[in-house]
Amino acid sequence: DDYACVEGLRKKVETWDAKDTGTIELVDPETRRKMVADPMFKVEKTIRDVKKEKSDKERLVDLQDLMDEREDIYSVNCAMRKVHRAKRKEEKAKEEAERLAGKPNFAVILAPASEEDRREAKAVVFKTDHDKIERAVRRSKVLSGPVVV
C-alpha cells in the first residue's frame, strides 16, 4: 500500500482531529457499538453534540446579524451613490449650458439660443480659398528650409 522509502526520504505522518478543524466528526464503528451497548455513553455523546449544536446556532445567528447590518450599510451606500450621480449629472449639464452661453455680452443682450438658430448656423457654408491656403503652406516650407541647397 505504501511506497518504499529509498535514500534520504522520510515518511511524513500527518494526523488531525475533526474537532480542531471544526468539521463534523463521524462516529466510528467502535463508538457506535459502545453507544448501542451503553445507554449512558450514548446520552453523554449526544449531550456533547447538542452543546456543540447550540454554540453553532448562536454563531450562525451572530453571523446573520452581521450580514443584516452590512446589508443596511450597503443599501445606504447605494442610495447615496445614486443621489450623487444625479447631482453630478445636473452640475455637468449646468456647466455645459454655461459653456455654450459663452462670455456675457454687455453691449447687446442676446436672446437664448433655439434649435432653429442651431440649424441655421450649421447650414451656413463659408467660402474657403483652398489654392490660397496651399500657396501659403508651400511658401512657409520654402522659407523654413535651408538657404543653400
Image: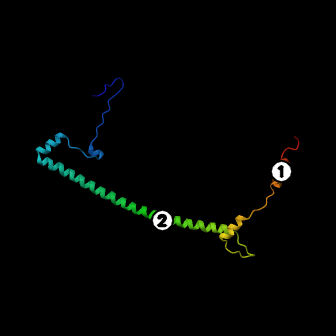
Residue 56: name its quadrant. bottom left
Q: Amino acid at mark 2?
A: Met
Tally of numbered tags: 2
Q: Amino acid at mark 1?
A: Ser
Q: Residue at x 28, y 57 (%)?
A: 58
Camera-nearest label, 1 or 2: 1
The residue closer to the viewer here, 109 or 7, is 109
Q: In the rendering, at what x and y percent does residue 145 appear?
A: 84, 45
Q: Is residue 40 left or right of residue 14?
A: left
Please, what secondary structure does the residue beneath circle 2 have?
helix
The residue closer to the viewer here, 7 or 66, is 66
Q: Residue at x 33, y 58 (%)?
A: 64
Residue 80, label in figure = 2
Q: Is residue 39 left or right of residue 80?
A: left
Q: In the rendering, at what x and y percent does residue 119 appear?
A: 68, 67
Q: Earlier in the sequence, mark 1 or mark 2?
A: 2
- Gap between marks 1 and 2 measured at Cα: 58 Å
The residue closer to the viewer here, 149 or 84, is 149
Quarter of the image that includes the N terminus: top left
Q: In the rendering, at what x and y percent does residue 105 appear?
A: 73, 73
Quarter of the image that includes the C terminus: top right
Residue matched to label 1:
140
Q: Residues within 10 Å of mark 1 (few under 14, many from 20)?
A: few
Q: Residue at x 36, y 61 (%)?
A: 68
Please, what secondary structure does the residue beneath circle 1 have?
helix
Q: Is residue 145 above or below residue 13?
A: below
